[in-house]
Image (tube, rainbow, N blue to C red):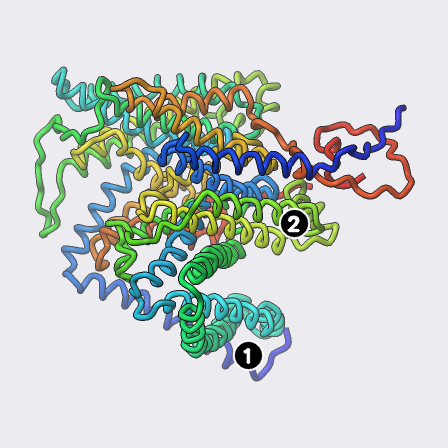
Amino acid sequence: MKSSTLALPLRVIAWLVYGALGLGIVYALVALVRLNGPVYFLQAVVDGLKLGFVYALIALGYTMVYGIVRLINFAHGDVFMVGAFASFYAITEYGWGFVPAILFAMLTCLLLNVVIERVAYKPLRNAPRIAALITAIGVSFFLEYFTALKFVFSADFITYKRPFEVVVWNIGGVLITNITVIIIVVTVFLLLLLQYIVTKTKIGKAMRATSLDKPAARLMGINVDAIISLTFAMGAALAGAGGVLYAIAFPQIWTFMGLMPGLKAFVAAVLGGIGNIPGAFVGSLLMGEIDVLVVSFLPMGSRLRDLFAFFVLILVFLIKPTGIFGEPQVEKV
Amino acid sequence: MQTTMPRKRLIPTWIPTLLVAIAVYLLVAYAKQTDRISVYWHQVIQLAGLTAITGLGLNLIYGFNGQFSLGHVGFYAIGAYGSALITKDLLTKWSGTNVGALAWMIAGQIGLVLVLMLIGRLRVGQIRKGLAARLETLIKPHEAWVFTTLVTLILVAFALALGVGFVWLAQKPLAAGLGSLITKLPEVAAQNVIFVLALLNGGTLAALVAYLIGLPLLRLGSDYFGIATLGFAIMMYTGLQNSDLIIPTMKGARGMVGIPRWTTWGWVFGVLVVLVIAMRNMLYSSHGRAIVSVREDEIAAKMMGIDVAQSKALAFAIGGFFAGVAGGLYAHLYGFLHPSSFSMVKGFDPLIIIVFGGLGSMTGTIVASALFALIIEGLRVLLPQGFEDWRFVIYPVLLLLIMLLRPQGLLGTNEWGWLRPPIPPMKGVPVSSKPSTARAESGEGGA
């Protein structure tokens, strides 16, 4: 490399710009903390975590299904809604505790999603991908409007009765409820279980093989249809658990509640790099934090939160088109 | 092997097409005249017409150019609100003068185009590349990136400043000229002139926005582009709900009222016909063939010397224009705009229509939008009392059945009548190969 008298001043200027950018970011963060005090900021971060962990449970289903059949399953948010309702009935009608209720919700969603997959998506496996997407939209409509009928769940807002008493701990001014703790514990447990299944077991190996190359997986003796069904089932079980936790955290349920959390979770999955399980988790935490921080700190934040969530999505796309952990797709001739 | 020559059609295809179009127009007009259909159904038919216009736009983007877009409803919203602001201005002078909004919008768009042209003329891209190449011999690439970004930002800011200055200077004489024109014309003529200008403005505004967001986002792969445009549509929706923060007369989540109800069946039909003719002629021109070739194989198209990025952006902008014009007609059909008409769920309607009609078929889109309106509204009539809630339970089941029975859509990629591709002029060489697929049979890609 030829040394030049210009090189040094140029580098100094470049690093000055870097320093200014870094200082700006630090200053912005400090200003944010000082605006309403560090306690307020930490409280927002904790609330964001609560939301982010619920998003993670939904996002995992999206990302797994997309990874294996390349389908944006728009009905996933409505499966999440069914989970919330199933646990609601288990708790209020039968007086079940938290653990049986969440297991019941997971099982309901699992069965529902397997049926959906068999009826609506499997016959279209060899059709153009858009046909399956349209059916997914159709299934989403169906779940929303069918459950809104009077003899199903009815279209009203229903107050959700928590299966346990809320306990609030005050740690240096930051209020942490046992809801947050339960959400984090359940999500981390399910996430680790999922990660274990996908990376360590034979079924997980079959799933990864199917997502890589379906015909080859079939030649290796893998029952591809069963694996796809299993993926849908696992995603739905996670979404069901997410529905229960969401309803416990924000105790009001109605049949259209799955739309926005579902979409946000999907965006979170895309942010992390779709098809990537740790990516979906990180993206969801990011999404939850953005949601809560925008609402807490920006003027008119509660009205503009969706705008910011999707703005961040487009920003990430412009910088890294395949998401944070996504691998670039190689175009073949 | 039998040689199949493309047969010369005995009757020129435009004759039956024209006859059908005239028949449809007269049928609806006659039914309205003699009160055989209610005002409600008349509006439904008009709505079907403008859904066909939006659908055609989306079909150009997704069906013909292969870019999966979920954000079409965003452009529809831009067209609706943009044109409504202009016509409402004429009646209520919310911006101060009769034509203030129109003048600002025209000047703003010209300014934006000028900025884009200036950025092209300044060769920002080339300067960046040249600068990066020069600097990278001296310093590390990421340090060079700082300078190239700074230079780009300065150039863009310069162009933007010039554009804003131009808009500021241009809107005053424009407003004065338009104002005197409006006062000179008789009232009915003035109204029609403003309506046409409003529709055009809604369309060009949507097209400009489409071009601007399309240029960076169209690099993304198909699914990612769909998600990004979905994000755009939801941003538009949230923005519209809070639009009263910027322009109070848009009223945000309360809904914009006081828009003149100027849309008639004649307007809808006329605009549809003009746009269909334009789209058909564009598709069978060299631009159109470039657009279709990008769908078929992007890399092959690039090797044939087609500017793929430009072709995608062009299709996206024209599709946005269609949606904008349809949005303008929609705004003046009901005289009331609410953000919930432009929500994500409503945004699926054009997508469902074009898939139902067949991706890459103009005829299919038009037929499907009519059928779609018939199904949605027909269920309202057919369902007995007390079962109205079942409408959106039956509709997805129908959707499911249609997709399961005919995943390629009603017409596939086939066209009817004059919309079929023209037979290329023969040079005395018989076409020897037998057409193998439906696409080759309809003559796409020439003989």
Identified at 61% across, 54% down, the residue is B309
Q: Position of residue B196 (x, y in %)?
A: 47, 57
In this figure, which residue is indicated by the disc labeled 2? B282
Determine the chain carrying the residue at label 2: B
Identified at 81% across, 34% down, the residue is B8
Identify the amino acid type marked 2: Met
- The image quadrant of residue B31 is top left
Left of B300 or right of it: where is B432?
Answer: right
Q: Position of residue A319 (x, y in %)?
A: 47, 55
Question: SS at mark 2?
Answer: helix
Looking at the image, which is closer to me, A38 or B151? B151
- Check if mark 2 and mark 1 are on a common chain: no
Determine if residue A57 is in view. yes
Identified at 14% across, 18% down, the residue is A96
Identify the amino acid type marked 1: Ala
Q: Which mark is residue A7?
A: 1
The vertical placement of A85 against B204, above or below, is above
Residue with the most extreme right position? B428
Looking at the image, which is closer to me, A202 or A26? A26
The vertical placement of A109 against A305, above or below, is above
Left of B354 or right of it: where is A262?
Answer: left
